[in-house]
Image (cartoon, helix red, strand yellow):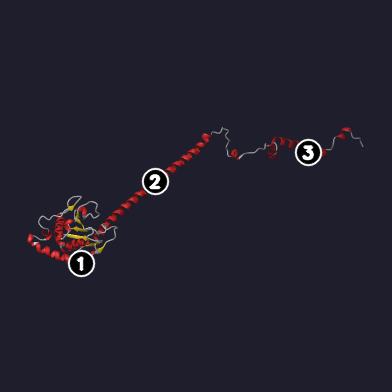
Amino acid sequence: MRPRSTAARRTPPTGMRRPSLYVAVAAAGAVAVHVLAGPEPAAQAEAAPTGTVSVAEALGLTASARPVDPARDLAPLEELAATRSSREDAQVAAQQAQAAADQAEVDRLAAEAEATAAAERAAAEEEAAAKAAAEAAAAAQQQTQQTQQTQQAAPQRGGTGAAAAAPAGGVARISNSTGSVKPVVQAAADAVVSAVPGAGRITLGGTRASAADPGGHPSGLALDYMVMTDAALGDAIVEYHRAHWAELGVDYLIWEQRMLSSPGGSWKAMADRGSGTANHYDHVHVNYRG
């Protein structure tokens, strides 16, 4: 056999050289991929700077570094307080207006109550005479005799009725404060003071504006025969009016807290008005028809 040369011994076989070449090429490719692709995401996350992000920064709000101004910072609070004060003032004004309206309503109701009370007082005077029939019974006989005497004397004076009952020149003196009484009232008073003994010496109250009955004293259609403590004289005046009811033009009588609305009717009791004068114990009240 021929001996191999040195070059032939150094050159490896072809099957042995190819794996080494593949390994070298793979390593070079890996290096290139690493250079071109850059570090992995995990490496980037580790390389990113770490820091605390506040909620204000997350919402896009930044802190202001301006100096504190008390006047400017308190202005909204002052405006709020002023607004609240204005509302309170408005509420107070509304409450005061309501109170004024309530008081006006109370005053109106009081005025209505007073008007109602006045009407009741007038009605009470009209129904106040129910009690005098028993007290006047004793005087009725005496008054009947006086009436008969007056009727017998009337033809001699040339007339009948209220005017005939008064003697010539017998004019009753009536105390009036707001004008004269109606003619029918004057004629009736003339007849009473002429026919009833003692009636000519008492005071006769005529017109006055203070009375509660608009159809009585204020209009000149009522008389108060002020007998004071002479109850017998009051009974006599009452009985004379009952005996000459139509002739004198009587509407109703009030005497001793009773009222009489017709000559043959019954007396009706009146409410207690608190005094002898208010209850007509010292005077006979007579309303005449106009």
Image position, residue 200 (x, y; %)? 16, 57
The amino acid marked with disc number 2 is Gln
- Residue at image point 45% right, 41% down: 85
The amino acid marked with disc number 3 is Val
Q: Could you say which quadrant of the image residue 223 lies in?
A: bottom left
3 vs 1, front mark: 1
Q: Could you say which quadrant of the image residue 290 lies in?
A: bottom left
Residue on which disc 3 sits: 23
Q: Secondary structure at mark 3?
A: helix
Image position, residue 34 (x, y; %)? 72, 36
Q: Secondary structure at mark 1?
A: helix
Q: Secondary structure at mark 2?
A: helix
Q: Which labelled disc corresponds to residue 279?
A: none
Q: Sequence order check: which comes first, mark 3 or mark 1?
A: 3
Residue on which disc 1 sits: 138
Residue on which disc 2 sits: 96
- Residue at image point 30% right, 53% down: 114
